[in-house]
Each structure stands twice: as C-alpha cells, then as structure tokens.
Image (cartoon, rainbow, N blue to C red):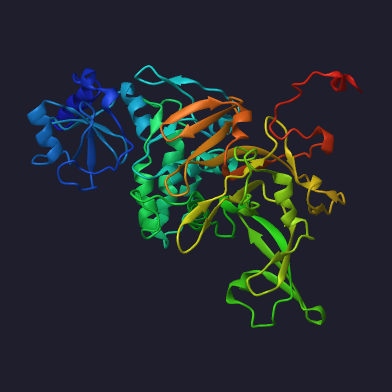
Amino acid sequence: AAASAPRARAAAASRACPYLDTVHRAVLDFDFEKCCSVSLSPHNVYACLVCGKYFQGRGPSTHAYTHALEASHHVFLRLDDGKAYCLPDGYEIEDASLDDVRFALAPRFTREEARNTSVLKQWRRGLDGSEYLPGAVGLNNLKHTTYANATLQAFARVEPLRVFFLNEQEKASETRNEKKRVGVLASRFGELTRKMWNPRAFKGQVSPHEFMRAVVASSSGAFKVDQPADPVDFMQWLMHALHRETRRHGGGSVVDDCFAGEMEVVTAGEPDETKDAASKDAAEVSDVSVSVKRTVTPFRMLALDLPPPPLFQDAMEKNIIPQVPIADLLRKYDGATATPTPRGGMRTFTFTKLPKYLVVHHKRFTKNAFFREKNPTIVTFPIGGRPLRLADHVPVPVDPRTNEPEASSYDLVANVCHDGAADSGSFRAQVFHRADGNWYDARDLAVDEVLPQQVALTETYVQIWERRQTDAAPRRAEEEDVFGLGDLGGGDDAMET
C-alpha cells in the first residue's frame, strides 16, 4: 500500500499537469535535425514545448533538466516516441491536448486516408492564419536545393509511391533490408512525404533538412546542400536508391511498380566484340547473318532529343522562339527512326512494356570543354484534361488477352522546368493536384495556382505522365490544340459539322 501511494500521486499529476498552458505551438518546428542544441548529441533528445529548442536527457545534471530549472520551462516531448514529460518533476504527462503536437512530430495516416489524398480537397489554415493545401506546400531551399525540391514535388504526384510511404510500408518486414543502411533514405523520404501531406500541420511549409542529410550520406557526397545539381541526375539516383531500400524479398519494389518499362533495342552496323558486362541483365538475341543485335532493355526514364535551335536569324525572326511538338520527339521510339551509336552503328527503339508512370527527360542542356549551353526550344504537349496517346505516334505493345493495343493514354501530372541561363538559372515544379483539380507552381516556399496554358509555355525539362486505365479515342490531326486554348475564334468554320 505504501508503494502504491507514490504511483497514484504520479498518475494523478500526469493527468493534471499545471504547465500545459505554457506550450507555445507557434515556435515548434520538427523538421530540423533532432540533436541537442548544447551537446549536439542525437541520442535521447527532448524538445522543449515552450521555446522549441532541443535538449538531451531528462534526468538530473542533463541539459533538459538544467534548462527547465534556469528558464522555468517545464513541458518536454521526447522526439523518439512522442511521450511528454514535466521537468524537473520527472513525471509523464498524459493529456489529449498534446495529440496535435505529437501528430505534427510524426503524422500518421490510415489506409483510407492515404487513398483519399487523391479525392478529398482539404484546405487548411496554419497557426499564422495562412491557408495551405496538403500536398501543395512549399519546401524550404536550404541553399542550392531547388533541384531536390522540384524532384520531391514531382514525386508527390505519383499516387502508388505516395500511398506506399503514407502507410509507412517502407518499415514493413518484407521491404526492410538490415544490411543496406537500414533504409535511412527511405525512412527520411517517408517522413518528408507524410509531412507534405499532413492535414493538421502548424504551417504550410516543410523543410527537407533531415532528408537532405540522408541524401548527402547515401550518395557519398555526390549531391550536396551547398552545390547545385541536375534534377535528372538526382531523380535517377533517387529512384535507384529507393528501389534498393524498398526492394521486396521476392524481387521488385514500389519504384518498379510505378516507373519500370521495357523497350526492344535493335542495333545494326556495329563491329562484333565481346558482349559488354553491363548487358548481362538484359535479354539478348543475336542474328549473326545480318549483324543485328536485339536487346530487351528495362528503363525508368525516357530521354527525348530536342532539335538544335537555328544558328542564324534575320531581323524578323530574332524574337521567335523555336517550338516542337512532343509527337515529333517521340518518333525516336517508333521502331523505324534510326539513331547513331558511339561505335558507328545505328539503333532503333520500340516499346515492349509501358510503365504506369512515364518519366520523360527533354535533353535541354549540352556541355562541352568550355561552357554549358541551354536549348530554348519550347516543347508543346497536350494538357488541360487532354491525354497524350502514344498509339497515335509510336507502336505500342499488344495485350495478349484481347489481341488489341494496350491502353497508351497518359495525363501530365508533374512538369519540372528551368528558368534563366544555363549556369545561373533555377528549377521549379508545376504539379497537378488531383483532389483540387488545379495546377500549382511550386518554387521552393512559394506555391501559386497557375492555368494549364501557362504550364505548356515553360521550358520543360522533366515530365511525369500518368497512364490511364482505359484508352482515349484517337485524336484527329485537325483537332490538335498544342496549348490547350480551345476554340477562341468562333468563326464560321467553328459552326460546321
């Protein structure tokens, strides 16, 4: 009975802490590295819910205990598990009023809530009174991380990838691999994804601080916070790294489920040499009589070559920006257009498996021994509810069950573009929020609604297209509207049937 009395008093105190009114939610920010502000230790760290600073420990002679005595700040939150304590008394605080703080520290989604991110329009208001839309929040530019911010905004549009990390499936036993960095990058990517879609956040911005620290460590310094990088290189590396850390025991990963496609590469005219070691993962069939090599190669990103801009312009053409339809660029993969190879041969490409999400890289930059050049050509593409139907431009695989071409209609969901000169410009992402039905321009912290026609006028660099389950009807050439402007003339021709 004597031993139960102190426990009863502690339990009563934990439910009636007199310092809960001192919690200042406006200063709380759980995006930064979780380490003590005094010792810089990342172990056993507590956040002071009064001033927002991080301190280590909670026992006597620890930094958190000292801070509680010196500043009279008594409510602390353990960052590992979200438990709250009152210092220097030392008892645990059990109060539902701190649930919103715990949710801001580590957002949680049910399976239904994760699926509804593409359906429910959830405008929210932060503590400062500003409105924000979960999934269309700004990302802090740490110094030169516009390349990473644009990539993260684009990947947030990939629904299977988003739902996977909102449900914390990267922590499941079938994807956890203890031998490879314990999934640190996937864990940080999942935390950042859940914060970007947090409907109960205290503010409408997120800082990718911990994610970028994991990127620097996982890439061995190839991508840094204080050095600009190419979004294409970063996107390819991130897809490979997430595939490695979320790979299932039976093979495959959520990355392959979203982005993996295959194409047949036919190479002719090259000298016969020993097969390169890099081709061991591809299925090869050689025809020696005609010196033709057929290779089925997987891909996660499709490269499209922009035509070179005109070298000379007269006085009337100096203000004209060259344009090219995306249909012309796709002819590279029609199985008939030949592309020269570095070894003197010719190569053609044909799709044999279409991915659920098609990532397209428009090769806008060229680099030589002296400087880096940028191709200003504008690529025109369908937008505003009109899909890109690959079957109208290139051969597509045939469904063996119906003996009909597979569905090949894609809708644009993300567009990463470049502004400025080749060496001093910046990247931004224009993303489609399916639940809201609008396009948003995300330039680091600034997120603004834009018209679909404005997306079509940018110097696009990387695009993500989502495949429809059912194919759209073939589009006639005379119906082509490259900028999505619709019928603005209203002349006599518009009335003809």
Q: In this view, does 349 lie above or below 61?
A: below
The spot of residue 53 in percent (x, y) is 21, 34
Q: Is residue 122 above or below residue 217?
A: above
Placement of the N terminus among the 4 image quadrants = top left
Task: Classify residue 54 as left or right of residue 99.
Answer: left
What's the residue at 70%, 77% (across, down)?
A: 270
Residue 385, quarter of picture:
top right
Taking the view exactly as shown, the residue that stands out farthest to the right is 497
For the question of whether residue 265 can be seen, the reply is no
The spot of residue 201 in percent (x, y) is 40, 27
The spot of residue 211 in percent (x, y) is 38, 46
What's the residue at 43%, 51% (across, down)?
A: 229
Task: Classify residue 271 as left or right of residue 120.
Answer: right
Observer-nearest residue: 190 or 454?
454
Observer-nearest residue: 120 or 371?
371
Observer-nearest residue: 449 or 375?
375
Q: Looking at the image, how many numbered discs can be counted on the residues?
A: 0
The spot of residue 226 in percent (x, y) is 33, 49
Task: Classify residue 218 as left or right of residue 267.
Answer: left
Q: In this view, does 217 lie above or below 113?
A: below
What's the residue at 43%, 49% (across, down)?
A: 423
What's the residue at 82%, 81% (across, down)?
A: 289
For the question of whether residue 155 can be seen, the reply is yes
